[in-house]
Amino acid sequence: EPEVTQTPSHQVTQMGQEVILRCVPISNHLYFYWYRQILGQKVEFLVSFYNNEISEKSEIFDDQFSVERPDGSNFTLKIRSTKLEDSAMYFCASNEVLAGYGYTFGSGTRLTVV
Amino acid sequence: GENVEQHPSTLSVQEGDSAVIKCTYSDSASNYFPWYKQELGKRPQLIIDIRSNVGEKKDQRIAVTLNKTAKHFSLHITETQPEDSAVYFCAASNSNSGYALNFGKGTSLLVTP
């Protein structure tokens, strides 16, 4: 079964540093998403991406965040100047269609900001 | 925006008993309601979903019901097993928000042998 792949699985960074989280969506999927989950809390939507541009974003997705699809396979989330409260599990997801169903989540990147 | 409330936050049942988790949503435009199971340190995995044109859906021991008028939906697990122990999240989505999933806060289910 096709999978969404995320790297790294765990990243530790110092406060104020930039991090890039990487995702390889399923190859025929067209819609890409980032979600985050602070430890012990619910999963929260960050951003959706289609046709090389952001289609929706939440209030969490402020100017320190950016997304990019630098080539035909990768989808990245950049956090410019990390804060302690950015520590969370970040999940990438992709979908073949624009719909709530059909989401496939990646295994996540645990980001720890120290 | 959409607000999804989920209850209870924790649920402990004995093996073989049924478990029910309830969610309410605020946006009447929401038309898709998935349920995810998340084991510790792992990704959310879809276990069942329901669309707004259906009132009930069943898949073996798992069923979901939807009441559009009252804006609530529920997950029912029958004949629970210890391996059902996990955190369960409900979610709602609609086209107005590009089908972003709005999750509830989760229910930690513990099934004791």
Image: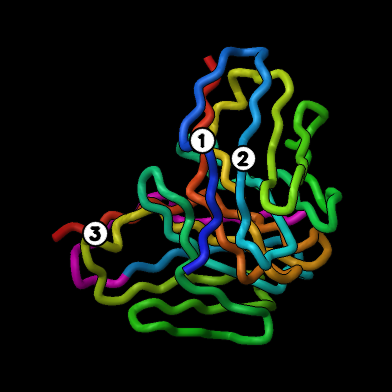
For badge 3, the amino acid type reads Val
Colouring convention used in this rendered image of the protein: rainbow
Measured as percent of width and height from the top left, residue A90 is found at 57, 40
The answer to whether A74 appears left or right of A104 in the picture is right
Identify which residue, B22 or A5, lies in the foreground: A5
**Magenta residue check for B13:** yes
Disc 3 element: strand
Residue range in magenta is B1-18
Measured as percent of width and height from the top left, residue A98 is found at 75, 68
For badge 1, the amino acid type reads Pro
Mark 2 vs mark 1: tell me if same chain. yes
Question: In the image, which disc is placed on residue A22?
Answer: 2
Measured as percent of width and height from the top left, residue A15 is found at 61, 13
Q: Residue placed at 29% from the left, 57% from the top?
A: B85
Mark 3 vs mark 2: tell me if same chain. no
**Which marked residue is nearer to the observer: mark 1 or mark 3?**
1
Give me the C-alpha separation between circle 3 and circle 2.
36 Å
| Residue position for label 3 | B111
Q: Residue placed at 28% from the left, 54% from the top?
A: B110
User: CB under 8 Å between callouts 1 and 3?
Assistant: no
| Residue position for label 1 | A8
User: CB under 8 Å between callouts 2 and 1?
Assistant: yes
Look at the picture and state if B99 lies above or below A67. below
For badge 2, the amino acid type reads Arg
Q: Residue placed at 60% from the left, 54% from the top?
A: B103
